Amino acid sequence: MRPLQAAAVAAGTLAAAALLVALAGASPLAAARALLDGALASPAALGETFARSTALVLTALGAVVAFRSGVLNIGLEGQLLAGAAAAAAVGPAVGNLPFIGRLAVLLAAALAGAAWVLPAAWLAERRKVPAVLSTILLNLVAAAGVTWLVRGPLRDPAGDYPQSRPLADALVLPPLVPGTRATAAVVVAFALAALAAVVLGRTALGLKLRAAGLSPRAARAAGLDDVGLRTGAFLASGALAGLAGGLEVLAITARLYDPFSAGIGFTGIAAALLGGMAPAGSAVAALLFAALGAGSSALQRDAGVPSALASVVPALAVLGLLLARGRREAP
Amino acid sequence: MSGFLEVALLLSAPLLLAAAGELVLERSGSLQIGLEGTMLAGAFTAFAAARAGTGPYAALAASAAVGAGAGLLFALFAVARRADPILVGTVWNLLALGATGFAYRLLAGETGSVLQVRTLPADLLGLPWPVLASFLVPPVLHLLLTRTRPGLRIVAAGEHPEAVRAQGLSVVAIRTGASTLAGVLGALGGGLLVLTISPTFVEGVTAGRGFLALAIVVFARWKPLRLVPASLLLGGVTALQYRLQALGFQAVPYAFFLALPGLLALAALAVSGRGGGAPKALGTPAP
C-alpha cells in the first residue's frame, strides 16, 4: 500500500465516522474530543483501552497465524467463546490458589479454543469442506452453547440473571495500576504478538507455514507436510482465540454470561487485515480499535452517539483498504 | 399462524430466498459470505420503513431496494476491484451488524424498548403470499440458469470465465448482475423475517440465518431445486424450537435447538463434502 492510498483510506474513514457522529446529532469535533478523552486522557481511560486490546490482539494474532498458513479461520468468535466457557467452567472449581488456578484456567481456555477448531480441521482436510463455512457454522453452535451453559450446568444459583458462578477473587487478575482495568493479561497478549512475529518471520517453522500458505502444492512438492502445517496453524489459531476468551474471564468479567462477545473475533480479523497480516501491525491495529471501543463507550455515555461506532469504523477502514488495494493479495 | 407447518414455512422462506440469491452469485463465480450482513440490512430496512409508516408491502420493497444497493456495492469491491471476496464478506458482516445496531439506536433511542411493526397479512392459505411466492423462486431460477441466455451466461462466467471473456462479454458485468440479484433476494429474506414472524428489530435479528443459507447452497450442490428440501429441513428444525418453547418444554434445553440448525448444517457438509457441483471458477477474480 502506497502512503497516498493509506492517507486516502484514513481520510475517508474519518469522514465517514464524522458523518455518522453528525447523524447521531453530535458535533464531530466535540465527539472527537470526547472519544480521545475516553480512550487516552486519563490513566483509567488508557487502562480501559489496554484492557479492551487484550482479546482483540489475541484474536488478530489467531487470524494472522491461520491466514498466513492458508487457513481461512473466520470462526475466531466461536473459539473465543469456547475458551471463555472453559475458563468459566474450570475457574470456580480450582479454588483460590492463584498461580496454579490461573494456569489451569488459561490452559483449559487455550485447549478449548483449539478443540473447537478440530471439527473444522477434520472437515477441511478429509471432506474438502471450506474452513470458511465450517468455522462460521461453529460460531453459531458456540453461541448456542454459551446460552445453554449459563442457564444450565454453569448457572450461578445465587444470581437472578443467567450467568455462571464467579471465579474466586484471589484468582481474578488484579489491575497493574490501581484504579484502572488493565491487568497482566495485556502483557501476555503483547508478548505473544512479539513471539508470533519472531516465529513467523525468523524461524524455519514460520517459513514453512508461510510457504504452505502461499502455495500448498509447491510446499508439498518441496517435501513439506502441508496438511500437518495447516492443521497445526489452525489449532494454534484456535488456541489463541480461546486464550483471548480465557483472559477476558480471568481479567475482566470473572464469569460467563450471554451474549458474551459482541463480535470481538470479527473485529480481530479486521485488525489483522488492517495490520497487513503481520503480527506487529495487527497488534497496533488491535490497539487502535480498542482505543476506538473505549472512546466510543465514553461517547455514547456523554453525547448519545451509539457505541456501535466501534464496529462500523474498523469495518469501513478495512473495506477502504480492500477497495484501494484491489486484487493484490496480503503478503 | 399457529400450526407447526405454517411456522415451518414462515421460517424456511427467508432461508430459501437468501440461499437462492447466493446460489446465483456463486454460479456466476463470485461468493458473498457476508450474506448474513445483507439479510440484516434487509431486516433493518423493513423495520425502519414500517416504523416510518409505510405499509408492509412497501417495507418489503424498501428491503429489496437496499438489497440491490448492497449487491452492487459488494460487486464494486469483490468483482470490479477484484478484492478477495472472502475478506470483503467477513468485514461486510461486521459493518452490517455495527451499522444496523447504530441506526437502530438512533431510531429507538436509549430506552431499549421493543418496537413492533405491522406484519404482512396472511392472505393465501393462512400465510402472506410473499412467503408462498418464495417457494416459486427455485424453479424460476432453475429455468433461468438452464434455459435463458442471461442464465447460461451466468453459469458460463462461473465455469469458464476466460471463455466468456473471449466471446467479448464482460465477466464483471455478469457477476455484478448476479450480485445485485443476490443482494435483492438476501435482503428480501431479512425483510420477510421482520414482516412475518419476528415483527421487531433486535441487534443480530437474523441470528445466523445468512450463514445457514451459505451451507444450504453447498448442501444443495448449487442446484436451485435442491434448495427447497434443505431450506425446509432447517426451517422446520427452527420451528420445532419455537413449538417446544411455546409448549413450555423444559426436558430438552431450548439452546439445543438453537444449536441444532448449525449442527445439522455441519453434519450435512460432513456427509456431502465439498463434492461435485461447485462452479469451477468459484471465488476466482474475473479475467
Image (cartoon, rainbow, N blue to C red):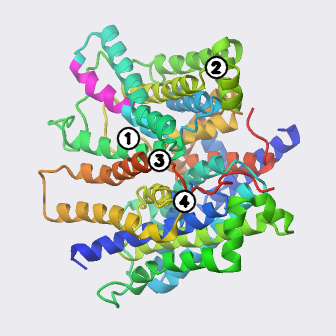
Q: Is residue B137 magenta?
A: no
- Along the line of sight, the residue nearer the viewer: A237 or B26: B26
Amino acid of disc 3:
Gly
Mark 3 element type: loop
Do labels 4 and 2 touch, CB within 8 Å?
no
In 3D space, how far apart are the residues under numbered discs 4 and 2 (Cα atoms)?
36 Å
In 3D space, how far apart are the residues under numbered discs 1 and 4 (Cα atoms)?
23 Å
Same subunit: marks 3 and 4: yes
The structure residue drawn at horizontal position 28% and vertical position 73%, both measured from the top left corner, is B7
Residue B35's mark?
A: 4
Amino acid of disc 4:
Leu
Magenta segment, which residues? A83-93
Do labels 1 and 3 touch, CB within 8 Å?
no
Kindly report which numbered mark, 3 or 4, lies closer to the viewer in this rendering.
Answer: 3
In 3D space, how far apart are the residues under numbered discs 1 and 2 (Cα atoms)?
39 Å
A242 is higher (above) or lower (below) than A94 = below
Mark 3, residue position: B273
The structure residue drawn at horizontal position 54% and vertical position 37%, both measured from the top left corner, is A73
